[in-house]
């Protein structure tokens, strides 16, 4: 432990962000780097707990107290080695993770927001390492002669590919989109994570022997038989992007889109692409239905595109500011989480439900909704009930549906290979991440359902271990799962 009294002397310092009026005028990241001296004080708060509950929170098993201590002692090079030992891409998680580690940090036992600033320390370690030129390709000492196909280039696919290439397999990543990165590239907006971070990792991975093939939609324009013929193992990392619909009257009006029809176009424009008839929020009354990361990303994007108003609708009640009595530490805190996009304007309406959309000339103009309450039920979950007389209308020129995802998109390759799905239509994998088809593995959202980047990386690492073991009969690769 760096400083035994650190946590008593120093409170948690919050992330520094660019002022709202400045940041909504551009697409650059809005979180600013921490001052190194302040970071040292924050790292000193870690108590190196006998039972580090932060470990319990982190799906990757990051050895958090170790790198907190190393940052406190200015031993940054060792800190990045310790961090990279469990996480291939700390620059992604350090920017984007909701930090379940902080959620379970012992310092947050009484007041959730007192936890050690683990995420800021993580991103500072990796940014510092890149600046110093310490992050270098790690090509294998020798090749195994085995070939592995990874389908999908989100964080799960990238993590699996990097791990497998480093132990000597020839890895090819197939991606149906025109750029690599999955939801990191085309879901998450530039203002949360600039895409240069993905490009930099791709260069490293190419130097380690990974080959990337874009516009390669396996099961569609590239037959799965080609992969079976040419590769010794296949890892399916296709994500879970089947969006939940809102089948109410007026849903077919123009101007109502799934979030993942809207966000990728905006991200492509940031990459310099031209989009014909781009869906944009400019000068429009925008309604975002559904909260979570996807909803927040729609809100932030709409602000930057110059929306006239942005209203977000949430079916659940407003969460409390601190943990409720039935939600004690170290459980995941069901509290109000204010994303950067929420600070930038707009309004959130809680406990409301959408009844209907109305329009003119086939284009949406209004949303009709009603307030609801959640009525407790004996022995079951509360039931949603409309409040009589609480109907309301909102102007709506652009409606974005961000109500979650229902699992992987249907793909003929499942049937062709005879892949078993679970009850939620995710691809089933065993403890080594192998599907019911020998040599075909699965990782990330495709097997968990829509989840988090940190879980996708953990899944990718676990699948890489499973593949290596299956191909070689033994493995040195670690699995966090
Ligand atoms: C808008 C949005 C914002 C989010 N924000 C956050 C956040 O801030 N923090 C966080 O932790 N999580 C966030 N998430 C969740 C997170 O992005 C996902 O959990 C994570 O990306 C899953 O990784 P993955 O590799 O399993 O799948 P994905 O990232 O979905 O990647 C799957 C890839 O597979 C490709 N693919 C699919 N089928 C095929 C095929 N047949 N052939 C070739 N390629 C194929 C897809 O094109 C895609 O590129 C967000 C999700 C969304 C939708
Ligand atoms: S739980 Fe918090 S204080 Fe304890 S070791 Fe982990 S980061 Fe440090």
Image: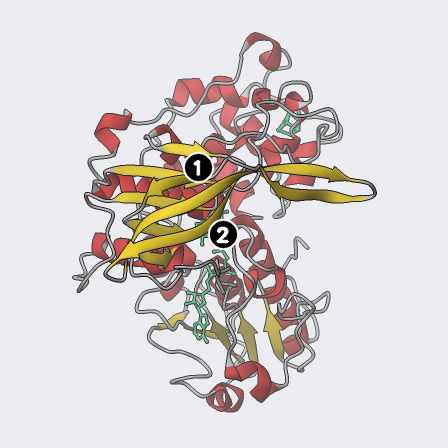
**462 with respect to 255 (left or right):** right
> How many residues crowd around disc 2 within 10 Å: few (fewer than 14), some, or many (20 or more)?
many
Q: Name the residue under label 1.
A: 123
Give the total of numbered labels. 2
Q: In which quarter of the image is residue 394?
A: top left
Inter-mark Cα distance, 2 to 1: 29 Å
Circle 2 SS class = loop
Q: Is ligand 1 less than 8 Å from the beta carbon at label 2? A: no
Question: In the image, residue 275 lies at what x, y percent?
Answer: 19, 62
Q: Which residue is drawn at 54% across and 11% down?
A: 10
Which sits in the foreground, 343 or 99?
343
Which residue is disc 2 drawn over?
Answer: 403
The mark closer to the camera, 2 or 1, is 2
Quadrant of res 46: top right
Name the one closer to the observer, 170 or 290: 290
Could you tell me residue 314's position as x and y percent?
50, 40
Image quarter (top left, top right, bottom left or bottom right) of the N terminus: top right
For this rendering, which residue is in front, 335 or 44? 335
Kindly identify the residue that appears in the image at 37 percent across and 28 percent down. Answer: 343
* Residue under the image location 54 percent in, 50 percent down: 452
């Amino acid at each position: 432990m760096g400083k035994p009294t650190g946590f008593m002397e120093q409170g948690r310092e919050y992330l520094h962000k660019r002022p709202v009026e400045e940041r909504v005028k551009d697409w650059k990241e809005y979180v600013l780097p921490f001052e190194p001296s302040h970071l040292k004080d924050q790292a000193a708060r870690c108590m190196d707990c006998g039972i580090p509950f932060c470990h319990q929170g982190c799906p990757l098993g990051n050895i958090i107290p170790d790198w907190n201590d190393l940052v406190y002692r200015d031993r940054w090079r060792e800190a990045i080695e310790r961090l990279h030992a469990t996480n291939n891409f700390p620059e992604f998680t350090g920017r984007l993770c909701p930090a379940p580690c902080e959620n379970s940090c012992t310092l947050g036992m009484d007041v959730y927001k007192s936890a050690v600033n683990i995420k800021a320390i993580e991103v500072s370690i990796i940014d510092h390492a890149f600046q110093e030129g310490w992050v270098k390709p790690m090509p294998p000492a020798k090749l195994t002669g085995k070939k592995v196909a990874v389908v999908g280039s989100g964080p799960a696919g990238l993590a699996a590919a990097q791990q497998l290439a480093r132990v000597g397999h020839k890895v090819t990543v197939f991606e149906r989109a025109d750029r690599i990165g999955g939801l990191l590239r085309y879901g998450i907006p530039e203002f949360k994570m600039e895409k240069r971070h993905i490009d930099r990792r791709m260069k490293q991975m190419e130097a380690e022997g990974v080959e990337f093939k874009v516009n390669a939609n396996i099961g569609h324009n590239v037959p799965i038989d080609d992969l079976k013929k040419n590769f010794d193992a296949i890892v399916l990392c296709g994500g879970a992007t089947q969006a939940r619909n809102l089948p109410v009257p007026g849903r077919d009006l123009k101007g109502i889109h799934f979030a993942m029809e809207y966000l990728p176009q905006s991200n492509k424009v940031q990459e310099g692409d031209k989009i014909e008839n781009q869906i944009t929020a400019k000068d429009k009354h925008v309604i975002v239905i559904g909260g979570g990361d996807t909803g927040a990303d729609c809100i932030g994007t709409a602000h930057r595109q110059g929306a006239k108003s942005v209203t977000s609708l949430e079916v659940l009640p407003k969460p409390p500011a601190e943990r409720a009595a039935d939600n004690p530490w170290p459980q995941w805190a069901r509290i109000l989480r204010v994303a950067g996009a929420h600070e930038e304007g707009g309004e959130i309406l809680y406990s409301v439900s959408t009844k209907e959309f109305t329009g003119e000339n086939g284009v949406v103009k209004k949303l009709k909704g009603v307030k609801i309450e959640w009525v407790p039920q004996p022995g079951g979950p509360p039931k949603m009930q409309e409040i009589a007389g609480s109907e309301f209308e909102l102007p709506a020129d652009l409606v974005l549906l961000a109500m979650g995802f229902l699992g992987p998109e249907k793909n003929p390759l499942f049937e062709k290979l005879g892949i078993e799905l679970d009850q939620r239509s995710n691809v089933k994998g065993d403890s080594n991440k192998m599907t019911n088809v020998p040599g075909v593995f699965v990782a990330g959202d495709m097997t968990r359902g829509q989840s988090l980047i940190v879980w996708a990386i953990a899944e990718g690492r676990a699948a890489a271990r499973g593949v290596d073991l299956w191909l070689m009969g033994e493995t040195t690769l670690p699995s966090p799962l």
